[in-house]
Image: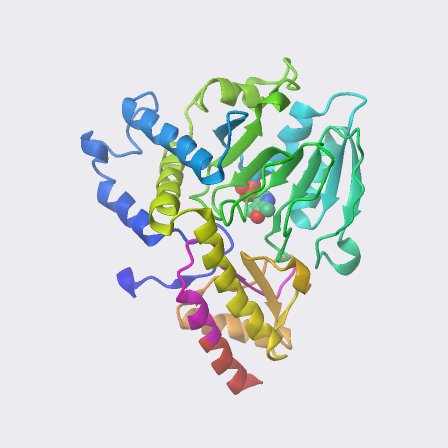
Amino acid sequence: MKHDRIFNFNAGPAVLPLPVLEEIQESFLNFKGSGMSITEISHRSKWFDDVINEAVERTKRLLNLDDRYHVLFMQGGASLQFALMPMNFLGDNQSADYVNTGTWSSKAIKEAEIQKKKIQVVASSEDRNFSYIPGNISFNRDAVYVHITSNNTIKGTQWAAFPETSGVPILVDMSSDFMCRPIDMKNVGLIYAGAQKNIGPAGVCLVIVRKDLLERVPKNLPTMLKYTTYSEKNSMYNTPPCFGVYTIQLVLKWLEETVGGLNKMKEINDRKAKLLYDFFDSGDFYKGTAEPGSRSLMNVTFRLPSEELEKKFIAEATANKLGGLKGHRSVGGCRASIYNATPAEAVPALIDFMKTFEKKNG
Ligand SMILES: *Cc1c(COP(=O)(O)O)cnc(C)c1O
């Protein structure tokens, strides 16, 4: 394989498009004739200004965002967003609705509770071990916002569509499925995505926020914890994570110009995921853990008949250049993360290996 790379099924940090990595390598010592690396130039330079503006513009184009939205680049990962949302948007005597679909949703809930904010968990899939996305949820009409995790990286479930909230803004953790398909922005108030799953390297979190929500931000918050600090300064109040923003800009360019946009990306992702799920459904050695109506396009979680076999499977897969198939440490089992940048050939290669492994061990 080119550059002796493996098929990388890691959940995050995860695979990036090879042409993007090659372009970074190519331009690393001398960015656009500056005589400096992207990691050496000033964030106040024209060079970097162009990078961040292009990243913003491409995000807007890919998602058809109108002027009501800001695109921001922040640090602290998706995990800091868990704390910032209630801090910035939820006032005294107000309440927000949360849906609990697994580890990351639970952590978002916990960060609101630490601040003694009033929230209500209006639905949860904990009763069946977070193996599905709850339906028919009644949201509170007076909730300030609704929080959901659109793709549950650990449990392998994904919302097929955002829920109907009767106009209450939805705040969405899209860390592991951002840009995997077009987004219906109808009720979306905020989207955040830790870049290291589907759009870039670790160290930067892309945030899309609807401007009307910013009117809620209290004046007396610490500067770096206010969304308005980022929206007013084009994410450059302080030094932004320049390398991360640059990589995201290149990934977005790849999405627009090489893949051909998010409808195309969705077709490709649908095809890759279907191959794996159809394979599970055709036998009973490998069992998908997510319920069929809730299966993720991005993180395909499955079990083998025993933990011994899972260990052996992961070890032999690694030896065959199929990396990162171990499930999250909190749940065990196996997981194939098949993000946007996972090459189409990776999935058939994995299935071939799985068939051979089953023949020898089934
Ligand atoms: C990985 C992940 C997180 C945590 O992201 P950090 O950037 O490490 O804070 C949060 N939510 C989801 C859905 C994730 O997949």
Quadrant containing the N terminus in the rendered view: bottom left
Q: Position of residue 342 (x, y in %)?
A: 42, 58
Q: Residue at x 25, y 34 (%)?
A: 37
Q: Judge from the rendering whether residue 337 lies leftward or rightward of residue 188; answer left or right.
A: left
- Residue 82 horizontal/vertical position (percent): 64, 35
Q: Residue at x 39, y 51 (%)?
A: 16
Residue 165 sits inside the magenta stretch:
no
Q: Is residue 290 visible?
A: no
Residue drawn 79% across the image and 41% down it: 121
- What's drawn in magenta, residue-wise? 331-351
Quarter the C terminus occupies = bottom right
Q: Is 179 on the left or on the right of 23, as rendered?
A: right
Q: Is residue 343 left or right of residue 149?
A: left
**Ligand 1 visible in quadrant:** top right
Determine whether 333 is above or below 118 in the image.
below
Which image quadrant is residue 291 in?
Answer: bottom right
Reply above or below: 90 against 295.
Answer: above
Q: Position of residue 270 (x, y in %)?
A: 51, 60
How many discs mark residues in the rendered view? 0
